[in-house]
Amino acid sequence: MKIICIGRNYVDHIKESNHAIPASPVFFLKPDTSLLIRNRPFYLPSFSREIHHEIELVMKICKVGKNIQKKFAATYFNEIGIGIDLTARDLQETAKNKGLPWTIAKGFDQSAPIGKFLPISTFSDLMDINFHLELNEKTVQHGNSGMMVFPFDEIISYISQYMTLRTGDLIFTGTPSGVGPITKGDKLEAYIGEEKLLTCQVK
Ligand code: MG
């Protein structure tokens, strides 16, 4: 399976990171070795001094597809969950400044904690899903799927022009504003609506 992540998909986060709103979705990959499951702890790596949290809604792909038309995109994912796109911001800045790929800043081990997934039938409106992240029991990021620059169907349609989507692939759909550093001893808790779906202790 592969993990595809959308960057720059919420206007408030695009502004806080001083970027322009993209004309088409920006995406990158994390390897399957970046997954962190079952609420396991995250161990701060020695190669970065600035790991940031980015809370994101995550789509789970349920069938194989290529060149998927937007009008059929909704049939290609059947679950939505919450994940954290952990980012080595210092390494990312260095890479960006040199015009190099972001891979080491985004694809390291454990950089993709994911929580429990919910069937899409759980949601009355996919374009009105509230989610938030608590850091040590204080809300630091909150978003709503309606605020995405590129909604779920556009993301699927766009990516599938370039890469075949397969059952089990995950798509992180971008983070709202409020990204920031994590330190040893922190507790991250991620929610969709009022339901806590992910806990991650930073060690
Ligand atoms: Mg992200």
Image (cartoon, grey):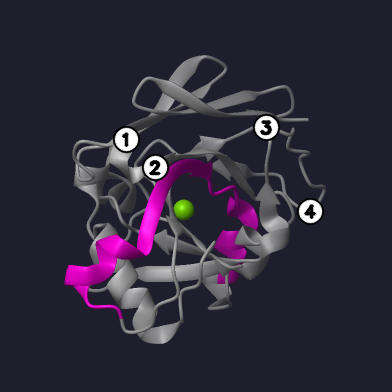
Estimate the spatial distance between the alpha carbons at disc 2 and disc 3, rounded to whole Å. 20 Å
In the image, the segment drawn in magenta is 68-95
Contact, mark 1 vs mark 4 (Cβ under 8 Å): no
- The tag on residue 177 is none
- Which corner quadrant of the image does residue 113 belong to? top right
Q: Secondary structure at mark 2?
A: strand
What amino acid is labelled 1 in the image?
A: Thr
Say above or below: 92 vs 28. Answer: above
Disc 1/disc 4 C-alpha distance (Å): 40 Å
Q: Where is mark 2, residue-wise?
A: 119
Q: Is residue 51 above or below residue 102?
A: above
Residue 83 lies in magenta, yes or no? Answer: yes
The disc label shown at residue 39, or none: 3
Q: Earlier in the sequence, mark 4 or mark 3?
A: 3
Residue placed at 35% from the left, 40% from the top?
177
Q: Are marks 2 and 1 in contact (CB under 8 Å)?
A: yes
Residue 105 image position (x, y, % from top left): 63, 60
Seen as rendered, the residue at the extreme top is 137
How would you rate the neighbour count of disc 2 (Cα within 10 Å): few for under 14, some for 14-19, many for 20 or more? Answer: few
- Amino acid type of the residue tagged 2 in the rendering: Pro
Residue shown at 57%/17% (left/top)? 136
Within the magenta stretch, is there residue 16?
no
Mark 2 and mark 1: Cα distance apart in space: 6 Å
Q: Is mark 2 within 8 Å of ligand 1?
A: no
Q: Are marks 1 and 3 in contact (CB under 8 Å)?
A: no
The amino acid type found where label 4 is placed reads Phe
Left or right, residue 51 beside residue 48: left
Which mark, by number, is residue 47?
4
Q: Secondary structure at mark 3?
A: loop
Residue linked to disc 1: 122
The amino acid type of the residue labelled 3 equals Asn
